[in-house]
Image (spheres, coloured by chain):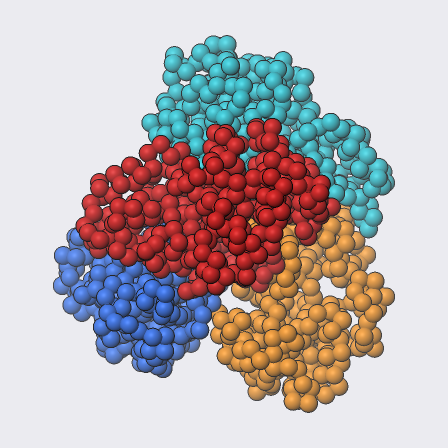
Chain colours: A cyan, B orange, C red, D blue
Amino acid sequence: MPSVLVAGASGYAGALAARLIDRHPRFELAAITSRGEAGKRHSDVYPHHRVNVVMEELDLERHGDVDAAIVAYPHGASAPVVAALLERGARVVDLSADFRLRDVATYERWYVKHPHPELIGQAVYGLTELYREEIARARLVAIPGCFPTAAILALAPLARADLIADVVIDAKTGVSGAGRGLREDTQFVAVDENVRPYGVGEHRHMAELDQELAPLVAAFTPHLLPLDQGELLSCYITPTRQVTQSELEACFEQAYAGERFIDLVARAPGVRDVRETNICAINAHADERTGKLFVFAAIDNLWKGTSSAAVANLNLMFGFDEGDGI
Amino acid sequence: MPSVLVAGASGYAGALAARLIDRHPRFELAAITSRGEAGKRHSDVYPHHRVNVVMEELDLERHGDVDAAIVAYPHGASAPVVAALLERGARVVDLSADFRLRDVATYERWYVKHPHPELIGQAVYGLTELYREEIARARLVAIPGCFPTAAILALAPLARADLIADVVIDAKTGVSGAGRGLREDTQFVAVDENVRPYGVGEHRHMAELDQELAPLVAAFTPHLLPLDQGELLSCYITPTRQVTQSELEACFEQAYAGERFIDLVARAPGVRDVRETNICAINAHADERTGKLFVFAAIDNLWKGTSSAAVANLNLMFGFDEGDGI
Amino acid sequence: MPSVLVAGASGYAGALAARLIDRHPRFELAAITSRGEAGKRHSDVYPHHRVNVVMEELDLERHGDVDAAIVAYPHGASAPVVAALLERGARVVDLSADFRLRDVATYERWYVKHPHPELIGQAVYGLTELYREEIARARLVAIPGCFPTAAILALAPLARADLIADVVIDAKTGVSGAGRGLREDTQFVAVDENVRPYGVGEHRHMAELDQELAPLVAAFTPHLLPLDQGELLSCYITPTRQVTQSELEACFEQAYAGERFIDLVARAPGVRDVRETNICAINAHADERTGKLFVFAAIDNLWKGTSSAAVANLNLMFGFDEGDGI
Amino acid sequence: MPSVLVAGASGYAGALAARLIDRHPRFELAAITSRGEAGKRHSDVYPHHRVNVVMEELDLERHGDVDAAIVAYPHGASAPVVAALLERGARVVDLSADFRLRDVATYERWYVKHPHPELIGQAVYGLTELYREEIARARLVAIPGCFPTAAILALAPLARADLIADVVIDAKTGVSGAGRGLREDTQFVAVDENVRPYGVGEHRHMAELDQELAPLVAAFTPHLLPLDQGELLSCYITPTRQVTQSELEACFEQAYAGERFIDLVARAPGVRDVRETNICAINAHADERTGKLFVFAAIDNLWKGTSSAAVANLNLMFGFDEGDGI
């Protein structure tokens, strides 16, 4: 069985990736590492994941000889680890933003100076529904941000058909999307009984949207909700021409025929419907009153939005069934 | 002190209205009635409101001789009670939809056959910021729906300035907005850890929006959130011409100069910021990237969205300070 | 592979049992039935369970020839179905209270007239940690109530060692334990931002506690919490003699040596630690200040408290590994 | 009107105290101070409190000449400020633990070295129902901890009647009780869908319980719940002799006759029943099955448990009606 390292297993995304690999029928969990909590058992930090393995300090001498790695480091910190693992021959799935953007300047405008711009060309954008063949051949996959995952899946069929003149994306997300760091705005009392827009006009995920939906420039605003896991995108589209409900549905059915992890549903989905699954549930509505098209897409930000997506990509990279272990 | 009847005090809105009148420095609570829970003490059903008064079966002989009434009945059931109370000389604030729409046909398309169309002409739309003078002279006020309240306050300044070419309203609401009736979709397990659009393309509040924002036809979609009280509207506007941030802010400042219950805030508001207040908090953002205008408006759906608004209207109708008792 | 019928798959417990059997590596899901929602697809009611099977009206002619059945009917309604299935040769795991109590009179005091008292003698109380051998030989297993499951696991080691003079059990449970029926006290607005004791002095699960912990009579009070799945029992024991922390820990370690689904943890567990697992996490504290022993036990009421427990029992009845499929 | 300084207005308790004084009909808010957020407007941090006042750095020269002060500092930091204010002639209500314990050694065992032990003798324990007359004459009042407030109100009537042989207190609290500091265990994701005991065997409030309930030594364990404000204490009492339900009720009715802020209720209260009130709701149950007495007490930890209690004490100290402004 191919061996897999999970680097950065103490954050929410890395912790879930470790669990999925630990239970995976075709991969072996080689080791898990953590920068801040090395020495702790994974199950002491995340008891319900039931991963009874000690998190170690990353040591490429000891951990680098693996068949594959999932890297769950913050942007900027991830690229050097990815580079070192690639150098040793491992195939790498990166959860950070470091290899999502194909344009270095764009990356550096939103994030930091890129530590390894020479690797960007190798990276495949790990949205399996759109780039399945490239992923299968890739040595480096960049998992999309959770918002772009749902947004692109919601909009790509219409964008390809040149049906989008203008689009507004209103995103709603649970708190786990903000990561595990201590912040005042993710304290229970700040979030409970509240809903608030954030990153208005300046959320980093917009750069990914621009790249993947070009030449469209989508208006995008995320909102923080009092729930743990789950993300709903409400997309309001001004079409380039009149579109009927049946035409709209046909467009999605054709685009996603045979896609096991896309659920085209008959009524607008809730995030509970996809909780702890690799599914993106999509509902499309041609609004007679306004002539607009509404597309609602729900995912679990930690699963389809990050960690089960990472495993699906890894499955493809090793020729396994895309759904193994998730 | 003028005496006030609260009819329909066992639902969330009527119960809060009863509390506000009970503690009001200038009104006297004459009686509270309930169709389903007559005989129960208000404080047995809503202990934290501390209204130690028994809810009675409505009896116009006994209850009709009041100076004013707040009627919190469902649509269709409200109009006959309103008519009878007006007949006896009471001034009436109605929380239902029965007198919000000036066009009978529109009302009947969305609701039921109108029981008292002859009274529609008398009714004033009870949005104090827009109709303060008419309210002061009114004998019948129809409190706007909670969504229209926030939407109109968010959009009216721009609409009046002819700045809106197109608008998408994404609304997020707590569960109390659905009322107290038993429904599967408001059970705890259905709402908790969830967010879901509802009434897609067919929410009744759209008729009010159309009436007040005409000739604009706004796209409007509400979403149910796992919280009790609170409503956030995210409005995405395509302007008729380019608008700068400072011009945008000036537009709102001018429109709401001197309005005590409008808070123009510097960052996008959360619903916690206005919890249990008569405030609508508004933040406007001119989005350079897309050229759109984003307006966020937060209210407490039971307070500014319904019951404290009712009291503010009643204050105006009796020549009191608009903020008395709220 | 043995075939399994899940009867009553539209409630929370039956729905989860259907999912677990549907994904089970050693059982085949023969059919799922529902009394109130026959004709609907399981995945329409519980999308995240991903069980793409239509729920049928129970028809013993068509559904009765199975190797085993999990029956998730309300008490009183369950026994006749269980009897019919046993008659046809199926092995049955019953989730209701109908076969938990060995004494008919006790059952009838708390519930209804027992429809099949003659079968009570056949039933094994399905707490695998205590009755593993009897379960392996059983044709009928009664899954314990969720509160008794956690309470007995928390107290049995001390009770067997005759260390309990007196015990108070304070139970905290999520809302899913109340089932899916529409009730005012499980509406979101009633539960949110609240905690309330219920069934004070009269909860039916006390009869099971009395049976299994006799001659102890435990004080027991459940509380409803604003969360979906999860149950925490805080047990306060006056011991028959002084017990040290190390003696206390030794008592639990000895009792549960080799038990894979009991986690003896070093600090008091939260219900999140065992969410969606078949684990009971237990922590014991000898309180020097009062001389009392505190035992905290956390389970997922729908998993270890009901449906994964049902599958564990079924595994044992068919000679499979107890943890298969859960 | 007497002027009141609120020192430490950026924490939850001080912020609420500032709001209550700001709206109080008989006190004038002289100034509000904050150690960490001086310069910010109160309404920027707590918009819904609507206190449009800038928080200042505490400067006794400028702020010390007030008639009274509410000090909401952490333990240890509070005593010096209290001492300085007393020195200048202000009457002081202290929300910290610094003057709750009459025994210096006990204080120092649980907290830190006491900065002003000479003042302990002057302090009155600010539980109005028990010490109303002493409070009226006091220059320094120490507001009880939120758990002791509810526990003592629940148990004092039985303790005075010598009816308690043994008592177990199981406390459940919302997250605001932990204060506003950033902590991993109060992050949304740690609290949501969870319930966990904490401070097992070592919570500081036990010292207050011992002092006020002596010679009783109560077993006491708090649990953290996914809600903001609210605290429920479930007290399980082994009585010194058999007590009937009617005798139990009579005991409480006699103890609390005429107490406006004690609600003796017919069924076990939820914390929602007392949300944002100065009320302690109490229900007592004589459990025939076990012979024990169950007493349930619900308060809002920030109101009756801290800040509205502070205002009630201040009212008494100035000869005002105890309920003014709360």
Q: Is residue D286 above or below residue C133?
A: below
Q: Nearer the viewer, residue A190 or D67?
A: A190
Q: Position of residue C65 (x, y in %)?
A: 66, 38
Lateral position of residue C144 relative to residue B4, left or right: left
Q: Is residue D101 visible?
A: yes
Which residue is rendered at x = 50% and y = 51% of the image?
C120
Q: Nearer the viewer, residue B19 or D325?
A: B19
Which residue is rendered at x = 34% and y = 54% of the image?
C214
Q: Position of residue A130 (x, y in %)?
A: 69, 24
Q: Is residue C73 above or below residue D296?
A: above
Q: Position of residue B193 (x, y in %)?
A: 56, 47
Which residue is rendered at x = 35% and y = 73% of the image?
D312
Q: Nearer the viewer, residue C1 or C166?
A: C1
Q: Nearer the viewer, residue C20 or D226?
A: C20
Which residue is rendered at x = 67% and y = 21% of the image?
A131
Q: Quadrant of residue D57?
A: bottom left
